[in-house]
Amino acid sequence: MKNLKILFTLGIITLVLTTAPIYGQDTDDAPEPTFNFSGTVDTYFRASFSEDPVAPGTSFANLNGFALGMANFIVSYEGEKSGFVADVVFGPRGSDAVFGSVGNSSEIVNQLYAYYNLSDGITFTLGNFNTFLGYEVISPAANFNYSTSYMFSYGPFSHTGAKLDFSVSDDVSIMVGVFNQTDQTEANYDRYTAFGAQLGLFGQYINFLGGEDYTQIDFTGGFDLSDSFFLGINATSASLAGDTGFAGVALYPQLTASDGFAIGLRGEFFSETDGFGALVSDGDADNFSLTLTGSFTSGNFIFKPEFRLDSASSEIFAISPTETSDSLSSFVMAMIYTF
């Protein structure tokens, strides 16, 4: 079955590459090629309201006291028909983001890919790119909450492979792709191959990732309930070999009070089975977390104070050298600069 998926996807890519019309453009109307340099820098302070400064078991924002996030530098070029993105990261958040890298030269590569527009509605991409699953992303400037969810932390961060993006209309899109093992940046070291697909309908996305002993189905979307109120939604279910896996759902209500201030809440329920490892090493467990974040913006500068409460079904938080607890409250104050 796995080989059939691979051959089917490669067949689609080959067919499109060999038969898609390559439309010429009038040079007078063609857009000028653009070269861009952008990125972010983030730092933060984190404390928990317990004797030991323990952090929730999610990615990023998990260091104690005054801490560093990352410096993210992105170089991109967009030509008439093709382009590239070279995205590198430095610092603790960056190291956590590319934890699957093996070679020293790749330990700073967050994304590295080239693409070619086969037609006005079809793009072929080859390289390493951030995952298409989930509501949250690696960049701290693109997330409303500074700390991340369990669903994001234990799902994929990036993929290395090939994909085709089809823009069917302004409201409908399709993506299919073949990848190495999730988060394995440089090459396919263990001959594991994954298949991915995405269907986008009016700003709502249904995502699929499958491979040897792993399957994940994910829904990501949101709705503008008013001019100032947005509700984001993420639901996911992942299963590994045997019965182990995880599932969760999160709501992201966000209120924009002014041009410079917004406030948002993330309410997430996360559950794992048969010792998946996010919460416990054996048995079943679940966690409910509420994260309240304020976002003050001035130009390229963003200040985010955040309060978070985690409540688990087991005593998974080591709040002192001799005591564990099933709940944890913590505070984060982050500063982000975008350029």
Image (cartoon, rainbow, N blue to C red):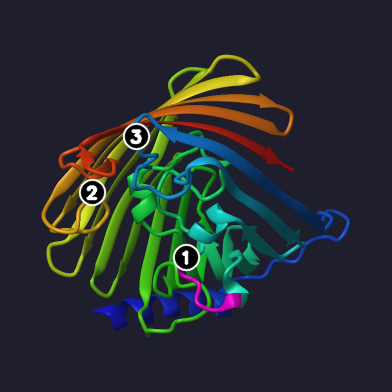
User: From the viewer's perspective, is residue 292 above or below residue 300?
Assistant: above
Secondary element at tag 1: loop
For label 2, the residue is 247
Which mark is first along the chain, 1 or 3? Answer: 3
Mark-to-mark CA distance, 2 and 1? 22 Å
User: From the viewer's perspective, is residue 14 above or below residue 246?
Assistant: below
The one nearer the camera, 105 or 161, is 105
Q: Residues within 10 Å of mark 2 (few under 14, many from 20)?
A: many
Query: Which kind of residue does numbered mark 3 sit on?
Result: Glu
Q: Is residue 319 left or right of residue 182?
A: left
Q: Which residues are magenta?
A: 100-104
Q: Residues within 10 Å of mark 3 (few under 14, many from 20)?
A: few
In the rendered image, which quarter is residue 113 located in? bottom right
Q: Residues within 10 Å of mark 1 (few under 14, many from 20)?
A: some
- The location of residue 334, given as percent across then percent down, is 57, 34
- The location of residue 59, given as percent across then percent down, is 42, 50
User: From the viewer's perspective, is residue 332 above or below residue 259?
Assistant: below
- Residue at image location 12% in from the left, 51% down from the top: 284
